[in-house]
Image (spheres, helix red, strand yellow):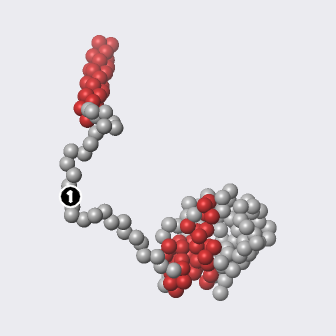
């Protein structure tokens, strides 16, 4: 049976164990952080024999990326966009339709209320789309588009090639 005395002893044992764990944690932190935060120097430096080299990624032109673009991979990349955009002509979703977007003027879809962050005087060239798809909020500050962007250049090129292919 569980009476008051048994309950009190169980609760006391639990609190005592918790106190021991907290004291052990405090002691370990004190041992680990001895000497302060800013005045600690590395005791031994391992010389690997090589200077630190910064590897520079080979820059590939957009034309080469588009020439090697895979439409199947682009269609899979479009699945990230499909929640808000449609590729059918005139079928706006949360975002404007992307039918014929390559070469189309920016902010030019009838019946869609744009946020005003895009420069409507320009067209959606592959170069503009490439920059926009990397970081939409960086390309058009103030846009209401919540997409984080595509970091991989080949993924962006695949998506642009796919969008260019849907309108024949």
Residue 88 position within the rendered picture, expressed as x and y whole percent measured from the top left: 68, 76
* Quarter assignment of residue 83: bottom right
Crowding at mark 1 (Cα within 10 Å: few <14, some 14-19, many 20+): few
The number of numbered discs placed on residues in the rendered structure image is 1
Quick one: quadrant of the N terminus?
top left
Q: Is residue 106 left or right of residue 55?
A: right
Q: Is residue 3 at all visible to an observer of this figure?
A: no
Observer-nearest of 127 and 101? 127
- Residue at figure coordinates x 28%, y 39% from the top left: 40
Q: Which residue is mark 1?
A: 47
Observer-nearest of 86 and 41? 41
Question: Furthest residue to the top?
Answer: 5
Observer-nearest of 130 and 111? 130
Quick one: quadrant of the C terminus?
bottom right
Q: Is residue 111 at all visible to an observer of this figure?
A: yes
Residue 93 position within the rendered picture, expressed as x and y whole percent measured from the top left: 69, 65
On screen, residue 128 above or below 69: above
- Residue at figure coordinates x 61%, y 76% from the top left: 127
Residue 60 position within the rendered picture, expressed as x and y whole percent measured from the top left: 48, 79
Q: Is residue 103 left or right of residue 24?
A: right
On screen, residue 66 above or below 137: below
Q: Is residue 38 left or right of residue 92?
A: left
- Residue at figure coordinates x 27%, y 30% from the top left: 30
Residue 74 position within the rendered picture, expressed as x and y whole percent measured from the top left: 53, 77
Say what secondary structure mark 1 lies in: loop
């Amino acid at each position: 049976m569980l009476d008051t005395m048994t309950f009190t002893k169980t609760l006391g044992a639990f609190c005592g164990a918790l106190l021991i764990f907290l004291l052990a944690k405090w002691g370990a932190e004190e041992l680990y952080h001895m000497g302060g935060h800013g005045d600690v120097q590395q005791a031994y430096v391992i010389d690997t024999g090589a200077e630190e080299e910064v590897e520079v990624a080979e820059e590939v032109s957009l034309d080469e990326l588009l020439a090697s673009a895979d439409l199947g991979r682009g269609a899979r990349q479009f699945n990230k966009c499909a929640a808000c955009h449609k590729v059918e002509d005139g079928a706006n979703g949360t975002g404007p339709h992307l039918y014929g977007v390559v070469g189309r003027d920016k902010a030019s879809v009838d019946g869609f209320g744009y946020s005003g962050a895009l420069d409507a005087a320009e067209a959606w060239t592959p170069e503009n789309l490439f920059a926009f798809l990397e970081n939409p909020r960086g390309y058009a500050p103030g846009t209401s588009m919540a997409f984080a962007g595509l970091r991989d250049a080949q993924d962006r090129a695949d998506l642009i090639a796919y969008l260019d292919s849907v309108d024949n």
